[in-house]
Amino acid sequence: MIALESLLLEALRPWRDAPAWHVALSGGLDSSVLLHLLAKLGERERLPPLSAIHVHHGLQAAADAWPAHCQAFCDGLGVPLHIERVRVERGASLERAAREARYAAFANRLGAGELLLTGQHRDDQAETLLLRLLRGAGVRGLAGMPSTRALGGGWLVRPLLRASRAELEAYARRQGLAWVEDPSNVDTRLARNFLRREVLPSLARHWPQAGAGLARAAEHLRESESLLGELAELDLEAARSDSPFAWLGLPSLALQPLAQLSEARQRNALRHWLAPLTRMPDSEHWAGWGDLRDAAVDADPRWRLDGGELRRAAGRLWWLSGDWLHQPQLAAAWLDPTQPLALPGNGAAWLQGGAPGGPLRLAYRRGGEVMALAGRGHRDLKRLLNERGVPAFVRGRLPLLLRGDELLAVANLPGLDGPSSGEWRLHWRPSKV
């Protein structure tokens, strides 16, 4: 058994019982070698069902021939191929947009527990480390590409990270494999191509094991990142206390336990918590965290991040995104209160129990509303919301049930959500983040 086969089997040993393996096949050297190795191993090893996925972006003329090349290659191996055609939105970073479109297509194809196998190798890892180092990345970024991560309902696995490109090319030439070359790979105006074609060869002339050493450094940094993650989990444990507004369905943390940590541990804990929610801000942008944390008690501070914002209210940090970033508009008659009412951009409301008589409508707070409470007379809604500590960003979204100008109920707030007799209650299910 050749070294590459042994390396591959060892890397995939924990995944031998997965429902299926899918190879991300670009048609290039790396993915072609990976698929060929797996197809040949499958002839003598008991492996999960194997297939390939080719994503066609249509960004350059040369790529139009790649689906046919991949189909012929898979036909020769007896491996099923699925071709996904995606549209890439052009923006500031076409490379990033293409990558996001590609992985979204892969995620959509993965069933529960299935694997997407990609062909990144040790030289790719070295390039990634150098690129991120030059951009001033922290430990998380310098840890490089992980060998595994969740993707869709399954997992992305990079089983060739310990193999060099030279080893893959030597295998391909021994096996007589043909592969496509992306014309953009020779454009050294692109940062990664410059590192691959100019910088790393120069380093290798002085340090022949430069690529291996950089990849090994990434492994050490990944271990350090894992330890920082464990520390973050310990620091976040106290901050993940229950919120009286858990029904909002928003990610949130208690602020006080975080504020008692050192600055470095605060940032480490927040990076860990925010990682699945947003791209990490650069070092300078972290000043927004200090402004949010230290704002006056009666302020309504916010820290804007990619795809959302962090807010502070009711002694907690809240992550808002999607519909939560926009004030909903509603002035709708509720013609059939026996049925839930969809609220554009704000979930849905419904009545539990009977419905009060008269023409009903739902609206949002505009200011100046007054509500009649049994035994308390008429009370200003603003004061009632203050008494219950309702976060400021929620107040303009709370559905109010009105009959004419009479405020009958405020959704989800006990004591305000319906009559004291309990014959009906106004409920609200907010939009999901």
Image: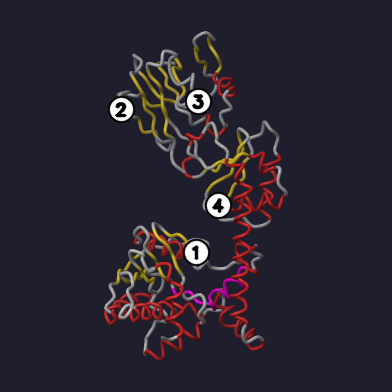
Vertical placement of residue 411 versus 312, above or below:
above
Number of numbered callouts drawn = 4
Q: Do the residues bearing badges 3 and 2 touch, measured as CB atoms within 8 Å?
A: no
Vertical placement of residue 109 versus 358, above or below:
below
Determine the CA span between mark 1 and mark 3: 41 Å
What kind of element bears circle 1? helix
Task: Provide the residue designation for mark 2.
Answer: 339
What kind of element bears circle 4? loop
Vertical placement of residue 36 versus 331, above or below:
below
Q: Amino acid at mark 3?
A: Arg
Answer with mark 1 or mark 4, whichever residue precedes in sequence. Answer: 1
Q: Do the residues bearing badges 1 and 3 touch, measured as CB atoms within 8 Å?
A: no
What kind of element bears circle 3? loop
Identified at 48% across, 19% down, the residue is 416
Task: Provide the residue designation for mark 4.
Answer: 306
Q: Do the residues bearing badges 2 and 1 touch, measured as CB atoms within 8 Å?
A: no
Answer with mark 2 or mark 1, whichever residue precedes in sequence. Answer: 1
Crowding near the residue tagged with mark 3, few <14, some 14–19, many ≥20 C-alpha atoms within 10 Å = some
The quarter holding residue 46 reads bottom left
Task: Provide the residue designation for mark 3.
Answer: 365
Determine the CA span between mark 3 and mark 4: 29 Å
The quarter holding residue 108 reads bottom left
Checking the image for residue 96, the label placed there is: 1
Determine the CA span between mark 4 and mark 2: 37 Å
Residue 6 falls within the magenta-colored stretch: no
Q: Amino acid at mark 1?
A: Arg
Answer with mark 3 or mark 4, whichever residue precedes in sequence. Answer: 4
The boundaries of the magenta stretch are: 119-132
Q: Amino acid at mark 4?
A: Asp
Identified at 48% across, 77% down, the residue is 184
Determine the CA span between mark 1 and mark 4: 14 Å
